[in-house]
Image: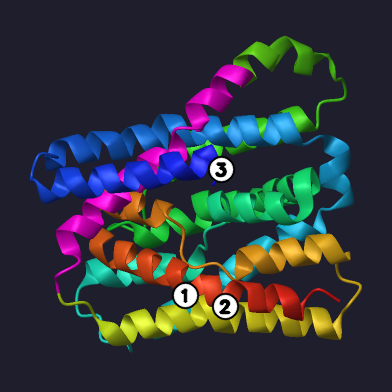
Amino acid sequence: MPLPTVIALLALGLGFGLESKGILPARIKAWIAMALINIFYPSLILAALLLRLNSASLASLWVLPFLMALTLVFGLGVGISLERRVGLQEDSQRRSFRFLCLLPNYSYLPLMVAQALWGDDGITLVAIAGVGADLVLWTVGVPQIMQQRHMDLRRLFLNPPLIALVLALILLQAPFDSWREMVQPGLRVLRHMGSATIPVSMLLLGAHLARRTSHRQPRTAHAVLLGLRLVLIPACLSLAFAIWPNLLPTLPRQVLILIASMPGAIVAVVLSEVHDASPDFAARHILLGHALWVLTGPLWLWINQV
């Protein structure tokens, strides 16, 4: 088992154990969540894009992040249409439901699977697809989970992850490459800081699983959400590729299917915590979804391999 996976699982167990013993105060969890959103995740975005991509790779595969963004918007549209029909009485749960309909796990698990199946080419394509996901997440996505959806635009667009994404895209389009040598030491530091994103996310996830696993959950909402994320979205995307087989080359198509077939993103737990949504609802979906993806994910990859 790869070392990053072992560390992530240990962090999950640590969060579960600390919360079970009641020694992880809510104030500390809030500080951890804010550090994750404002420091670790922006560092991960900058390092991943600037170390793996260049302007040529983005230009040749612009359809991939575009289709990734379109897939996310489709999921959000379905979520908005269903959020009041699936038995969710609390606004906090509806906001987390809507956000989970929008955002799949588009980085951690897809990166591991892509590396195992396709090597460095797979990692690069996951990063390129992530450009579209990040743009949707930090513009359209975040307001869906907030209590006040009509927020100050300055607060939305001046958030660290979106700033990191825009900065990376600007640097990738620079007409000279000398900047890469100049910023290499800084990028290595950012890569190490960004590597904390997944363990910290898993620690918070473990804490919420420990606190909420015995509580009653809205089963209909979870069933609908799992059906959307694991079945409907990859089925629609597979149908689109069957109708337009030249829309993407084979490998980028499989990478997009890999990401689109994923359950909700782990960051949903963190954002639910930060914005007073329902981290327990998000944590339960992520636990169930990743367990079931082991069965459904390989099926969608097999269907789209030719």
**Residue that mark 1 sits on:** 292
Disc 2: CA contacts within 10 A as few (<14), some (14-19) or many (>=20) = some
215 with respect to 135 (left or right):
left
In the depicted view, which residue is nearer to us: 218 or 92?
218
Q: In the figure, 267 relative to 93: above or below?
A: above
Span of residues in magenta? 188-215
Q: Is residue 77 visible?
A: no
Disc 1: CA contacts within 10 A as few (<14), some (14-19) or many (>=20) = some
Q: Is residue 200 magenta?
A: yes
Three-letter amino acid code at the position of disc 2: Thr
Q: Is residue 191 magenta?
A: yes
**Residue that mark 2 sits on:** 296
Label 2 – label 3 distance at C-alpha: 23 Å
**Residue that mark 3 sits on:** 2
100 with respect to 255 (left or right):
left
> Are the residues flagged by discs 2 and 1 in contact, CB closer than 8 Å?
yes
Q: Quadrant of residue 39?
A: top left
